[in-house]
Image: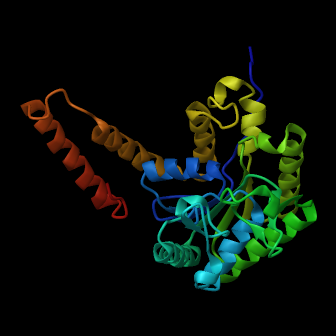
Amino acid sequence: MKLQTQIPFIKQSDNLINYSSDLLLLGSCFVENIGNKLEYFKFQNLVNPFGILFQPKAIEVLISAAIDKKHYTEKDIFFYNEQWHCYDAHSKLSNSNKQELLSNLNLNLELSNQQILKASHVVITLGTAWVYRNIETNALVANCHKVPQKQFSKELLTVEAIVQSLQNIVSLVKNANPKATIIFTVSPVRHLKDGFIENTQSKAHLISAIHSIVKRGIYYFPSYEIMMDELRDYRFYDDDMLHPNSVAIEYIWEKFNKVWVSDESQTVMDEVDDIQKGLQHRPFNPHSESHQKFLKNLDTKIQHLQLKVPSINF
């Protein structure tokens, strides 16, 4: 008996992810879930240097600023609720110290520039087509930082506007790094604060826009469709009923791994997983002879793996 409809998957590219790859992951909180998996298995990656960015225009601003080597100054930040903020970045970068915020913004922008130039893969997860425009400056913001709603107007990006933004992103990346493979995906997180119908409309705009630009070197991974069509049950959601839970994240990661990670990397991933579980082990008696032997064996495994893959660092 077949109790599930499944999306057919095949390897998507000649440029698959391996332990020589460098990845840049940008976008919604779901891209951080994938980034955490890549980090666990010790792939080389940089995830959301400006924090979570939900909508395509915000990602375009970051990539453009990184490639143009923009330098953030005091005119680019503001003080609110006892902290300094930047409308281009997530609130996780906000800081009570003005200079620390500017330093972090410019450092992360430089890291983004370096990663774009050397990236083998750029993974971009779009969360929403709804955007907020600062009424005073007429500029779209990546994050409102809990500034009163009356200072912003809320808009739904048209499919055409998203297509243009994605084309700009692709052109910026490809002009700086022609060898980069770009993978778009749509976050399965439900943005119900916008409304049920509005969330569906938003996702539809994102999906339509992405599919209009998919071609050689630009790919789509169906994380949204996996959640909607294969995991059609609230038991795969977190307590808030909006975010995929750990089981769903693991399931979608396994599909991503199957499609985008090279077969020869799987053996190394198994070795990394074995070491990671060893590092997480908590003994009843840390001073026992058996545990000391366990640690010595674990250290030998690490050294052996690092000889094979020097980029791996525990």
Q: Who's the residue at 63% across and 41% down the image? A: 255
Residue 12 in the figure: left or right of residue 33: right
Residue 89 appearing in the image: yes
Q: Who's the residue at 72% across and 36% down the image? A: 227
Q: Who's the residue at 15% across and 44% down the image? A: 296
Where residue 256 appears, as percent x and y from the top left, is: 62, 46
Residue closest to the eye, 108 or 4: 108
Residue closest to the eye, 302 or 246: 246
Q: Residue furthest top?
A: 1
Residue 177 appearing in the image: no
Name the colour scheme. rainbow
Residue 35 in the figure: left or right of residue 226: left
Where residue 144 appears, as percent x and y from the top left, is: 70, 60
Up-down relation of residue 228 to residue 49 (above or below)? above
Q: Dividing the image into 4 quarters, which one contains the N terminus?
A: top right
Residue closest to the eye, 139 or 114: 139
Where residue 283 appears, as percent x and y from the top left, is: 20, 30
Q: Dividing the image into 4 quarters, which one contains the C terminus?
A: bottom left
Up-down relation of residue 287 to residue 216 (above or below)? above
Q: Who's the residue at 64% across and 86% down the image? A: 68
Where residue 313 appears, as percent x and y from the top left, is: 33, 59
Numbered disc total: 0
